[in-house]
């Protein structure tokens, strides 16, 4: 069996914009928001807000020393049957991704007796592109990205977290807005346009008769937290962020208070998928290890840690019904991808 080491490639080199909302407590760097607030204005650490907005992460990983054999110059699969490329949605800095997902990668190694190399991408769009190109053997990815890969490229579903994912649409506590309809003509802030909650918010606005960038101006920001801070400091009328996150900003008492105006529809949480060429036998082994981990083992502890970090719930089978729930958001995702 290969040694249980994990390397990483595809280190991000763009300017860092790191959101505390998307970083686990054990990996929280001291940084400022994208609006260049002083470091002492940074929101206190909160739980992971899973796969909702990509984070450019070079600043968090600039000082990282990679093993000499790490293939940073290429994202092509190794072609080695004893090595697996594990693609991680780039929702954290490179350093935070390694720290958060190393135990999980170790579980894959122990289960399949193969070396695991962790890989990522600089942003959501590039991650989707590399998934389409088949550069990963296994992936941890956003639900709508998983649905796209399954539908378009024949990826195989392994499992997913059982809790629902939902977005909160929030406004300033003392704002005049009482309904989504009251936001007509205002500025509405979202995380990355391809993020799940951003698309869910767009669908919600349409349900209320508001056409994005016609009846209401959509402004994309670097993360959930920066979207919320824009509202708290009066730069926007409303924002969407992962459910419950605004309460943590309120608790910090460092920004204006926010209140929830509406909630988006719910969709399934993050999913694990496999390349179309991935062994069916290995897929079944991994599925069993994730859904029914042996109590007290390092693998079980790794899964418990993830459950606690982003409130995804237990890992379970993803039914066809769950995948069907993603149809509206998948349709809008495909439209956005084709627009650029």
Image: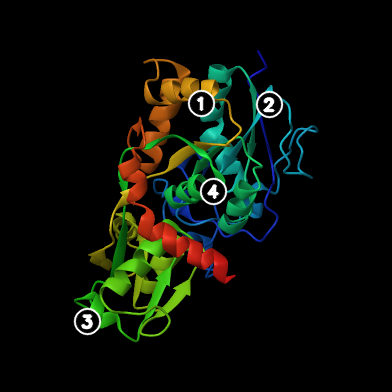
Outermost residue toward the left? 178
Q: Mark 3 highlights which residue?
A: 176
* Measured Cα–Cα span from mark 4 to mark 1: 26 Å
Location of residue 88 by image quarter: top right
Residue 286 horizontal/vertical position (percent): 49, 24
Residue drawn at x 58%, y 48% as measured from the top left: 93
Q: Secondary structure at mark 3?
A: loop
Counting residues from the N terminus, which is met first, the one under dot 2 or under dot 1? 2
Categorize mark 4 by other alpha carbons within 10 Å: few (<14), some (14-19), many (20+).
many
Nearer the observer, disc 2 or disc 1? 1
For this view, does 194 lie left or right of residue 259?
right
Residue drawn at x 28%, y 79% as measured from the top left: 209
* Measured Cα–Cα span from mark 3 to mark 1: 53 Å
Counting residues from the N terminus, which is met first, the one under dot 3 or under dot 2? 2
The figure's colour scheme reads: rainbow
* Measured Cα–Cα span from mark 3 to mark 4: 35 Å
**Compared with residue 85, is residue 206 higher up or lower down, i.e. above or below?**
below
* Measured Cα–Cα span from mark 3 to mark 2: 57 Å
Residue 276 horizontal/vertical position (percent): 57, 36
Asked whether 38 or 98 is in front, the reply is: 98
* Measured Cα–Cα span from mark 2 to mark 4: 24 Å
Q: Secondary structure at mark 4?
A: loop
Q: Mark 4 highlights which residue?
A: 92
Asked whether 144 or 247 is in front, the reply is: 144
Q: Is residue 96 visible?
A: yes
Counting residues from the N terminus, which is met first, the one under dot 3 or under dot 4? 4
Marks 3/4 in contact by CB < 8 Å: the verdict is no
Location of residue 77 by image quarter: top right
Nearer the observer, disc 3 or disc 2? 2
Q: Residue 283, which numbered label? A: 1
Q: Mark 2 highlights which residue?
A: 83
């Amino acid at each position: 069996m290969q040694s249980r080491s994990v390397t990483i490639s595809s280190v991000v080199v763009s300017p860092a914009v790191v959101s505390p909302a998307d970083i686990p407590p054990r990996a929280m760097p001291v940084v400022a928001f994208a609006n260049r607030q002083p470091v002492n204005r940074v929101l206190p650490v909160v739980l992971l807000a899973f796969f909702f907005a990509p984070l450019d992460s070079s600043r968090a990983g600039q000082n990282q020393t990679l093993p000499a054999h790490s293939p940073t110059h290429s994202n092509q699969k190794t072609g080695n049957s004893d090595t697996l490329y594990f693609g991680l949605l780039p929702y954290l800095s490179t350093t935070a991704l390694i720290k958060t997902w190393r135990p999980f990668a170790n579980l894959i190694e122990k289960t399949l007796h193969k070396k695991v190399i962790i890989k990522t991408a600089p942003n959501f769009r590039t991650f989707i592109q590399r998934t389409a190109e088949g550069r990963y053997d296994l992936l941890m990815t956003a639900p709508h990205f998983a649905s796209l890969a399954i539908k378009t490229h024949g990826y195989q579903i392994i499992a997913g977290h059982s809790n629902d994912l939902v977005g909160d649409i929030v406004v300033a506590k003392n704002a005049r807005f009482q309904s989504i309809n009251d936001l007509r003509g205002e500025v509405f802030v979202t995380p990355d346009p391809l993020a799940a909650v951003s698309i869910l918010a767009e669908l919600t606005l349409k349900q209320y008769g508001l056409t994005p960038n016609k009846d209401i101006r959509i402004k994309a920001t670097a993360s959930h937290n920066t979207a919320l801070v824009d509202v708290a400091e009066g730069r926007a009328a409303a924002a969407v962020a992962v459910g419950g996150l605004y309460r943590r900003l309120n608790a910090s008492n460092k920004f204006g208070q926010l209140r929830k105006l509406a909630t988006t529809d719910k969709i399934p949480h993050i999913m694990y998928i496999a390349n179309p060429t991935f062994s069916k036998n290995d897929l079944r082994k991994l599925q069993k290890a994730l859904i029914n981990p042996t109590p007290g083992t390092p693998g079980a502890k790794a899964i418990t840690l993830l459950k606690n970090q982003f409130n995804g719930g237990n890992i379970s089978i993803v039914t066809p019904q769950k995948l069907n729930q993603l149809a509206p958001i998948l349709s809008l995702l495909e439209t956005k991808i084709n627009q650029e």
